[in-house]
Amino acid sequence: MYIYRLNVQPDCANLMFEDYYQILGIEYHAGPKAIQKAFHKLAKEFHPDKNPNNIPAAEKFKKITEAYVTLSDPQKKHQYDLKLRFGAYASFISKARPRQYTARTKRPVSPYFYRKNIIFSPQIKMWGGISVIAIILVVAVTTVFLTRYNASFDFQKGLANYHNKHYSSAYFNLKESISPLSPYLAATHLLMAEICFNQQRNLDQTRSHIKKAYQAVPSDSINARLLYLEGKVDYLQGNHETAYQLFLESTSFLPGFDSATYQMGELDLFVFARFDKALEHFQTLARNNPQNHEAYLAAAYCHQQLDQHEKAITQIDKFLLLRTDVGMAHYIKAISAQALNLREISCANYLEANRLGVPAAIDSLNSYCGRSLTR
């Protein structure tokens, strides 16, 4: 909407009737309130009750009333203003839409101060729409970019603190990075779940973060770690079958997932007493990672439970090539050597197991090897 003025005073030749604005003593741009105020003021002054037998006052009151009746009615005022401006030509435009007079300044202005509707061409409308859309897109893209940047920054800080074992700070940073626009949302909840499980043993909070990580559509590797962690929670809660299935499912997302394979072997060995199955898991671990000394120790124990003592000693020897400071390894080898009647080997390992703090070794030293070896 644009404002323009017709700075032309009423044509004197067209003033074939009274000027109601002058009668009321108001400006041509006066609004309804100014018109009403002027009428009330003059009506009090020239009312017949205050001027009995005063013919000029009565005539003045009549004109005041006529002016107010016309100017207080928007339609009548519009018709009157047309006649005031155009005189004889008003009949051609008498059906025009009334326009509101507007005063933008306190200076005296023409009574013909109209609002003008500007009709834009289709091209201007099109480019105007394109400009608005472009501005909206720029704002949206900028907002998304800044949100993702802040989320990524907080996540990297949390990850660094996690690796440095500053778990409280890591949890805080990771929590600050949570956003639907974060590219690391699944990983964020995974790390928070691991902190809740490993450092706080808060199983309910751990499950809550696991659930949120699943909802964030994690990658296969993150899925594997989530299933493994969920299995650990069920393991602690005594849900061994459920835990086993979760460990197994995690290996389908991440083949060669050593931690999950070890947990399945441990369940088969100590909970379900499926020694053959457990042995398969530990042998798989040893093949995947020959430096995994725990796999050799567990495999040796499985062989021992299956009365395969020579194989048990072979696995323990592989373990002892990597570590010699574990008393349980010497104890297992001593038991298998005793079963094979290898007294010297057995007693030497019972003695070493006793030295490394295995309480059960002392009884075997006394009963099988003789007291003199304990001195």
Image (cartoon, grey):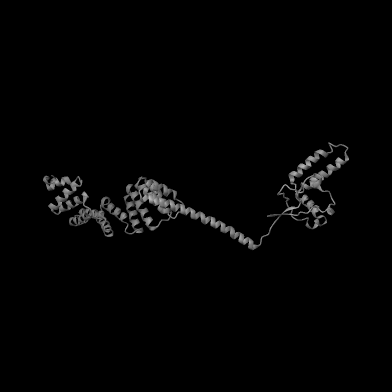
| Rendered residue at 32%/53% (across/down) | 244
> Foreground residue, 337 or 199?
199
| Rendered residue at 16%/53% (across/down) | 337
> Foreground residue, 121 or 104?
104
Q: How many marks?
A: 0
**The C terminus lies in which quarter of the figure?**
top left
Q: In x, y percent, where is residue 334?
A: 17, 51
| Rendered residue at 38%/55% (across/down) | 222
175 vs 234, left or right, is right
Q: In x, y percent, where is residue 140?
A: 53, 55
> Foreground residue, 369 or 26?
26
| Rendered residue at 33%/50% (across/down) | 232
- Residue 259 location, quadrant: bottom left
Residue 181 shows in this picture: no
Residue 141 shows in this picture: yes
192 vs 110, left or right, is left
167 vs 94, left or right, is left
**The N terminus lies in which quarter of the figure?**
bottom right
Q: In x, y percent, where is residue 310?
A: 17, 57
- Residue 118 location, quadrant: bottom right
Residue extending furthest toward the front: 107
Q: In x, y percent, where is residue 251?
A: 33, 57
